[in-house]
Image (spheres, helix red, strand yellow):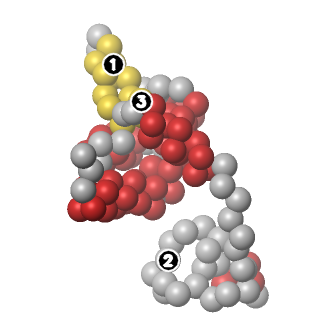
Amino acid sequence: MLTIASRVDVMNRLGRAMADPTRSRILLSLLEQPGYPAKLARDLDLTRTNVSNHLSCLRGCGIVVAEPEGRQTRYEIADPHLTAALVALVDVTLAVDESAPCLDPACSVPGCCDTEATA
């Protein structure tokens, strides 16, 4: 049974995973199909080291699992419920007030606090 503390932990892990644009791109790719670090790196135009580091983070958060396949490792979303939840999140339409100032001066989300776009 999930307690409030464990539910908060789940939300924090998901939030940490999705807060990084590269991890979000990897997750979106893994929602389509399982992936391999080298192929993910090619498809997402990233270095293999970068992809491996992000996959390690996602694995540590319990969001993806690694399945050895000979000399390669296949990564996939850890649970079908999580896949469904991520698909539901991606399908959400957000009502964003673009005239509202960003509250986080250290925000690095593309388009969120982009003062050049609003100037």
Rendered view: 90 above or below 75 = below
Q: Residues within 10 Å of mark 1 (few under 14, many from 20)?
A: few
* Image coordinates for residue 88, horizontal then vertical, percent: 59, 46
Q: Secondary structure at mark 1?
A: strand
Residue kind at label 1, given as amino acid type: Gln
- The number of callouts visible is 3
* Residue that extends furthest to the front in the rendered view of this protein: 1
3D distance between C-alphas at marks 2 and 3 = 29 Å
N-terminal of the pair, mark 2 or mark 3, is 3
Q: Which residue is mark 3?
A: 76
Rendered view: 86 above or below 78 = below
Instruction: Judge depth for marks 2 and 3 and give the one in front.
Output: 3
On-image quarter of the C terminus: bottom right
Q: Residues within 10 Å of mark 2 (few under 14, many from 20)?
A: few
Residue 72's label in the rendered image is 1
Residue kind at label 3, given as amino acid type: Glu
Query: What residue lies at 28% left-to-right and 18% top-to-bottom?
Result: 68
Q: Secondary structure at mark 3?
A: strand
Name the foreground residue: 116 vs 68. Answer: 68
Q: Residues within 10 Å of mark 3 (few under 14, many from 20)?
A: many
Question: Can residue 35 be spotted in the picture?
Answer: yes
* Image coordinates for residue 114, horizontal then vertical, percent: 64, 78
Query: What residue lies at 65% left-to-right and 71% top-to-bottom?
Result: 111
Rendered view: 105 above or below 17 = below
Q: Which residue is mark 2?
A: 107
Query: What residue lies at 30% left-to-right and 42% top-to-bottom?
Result: 62
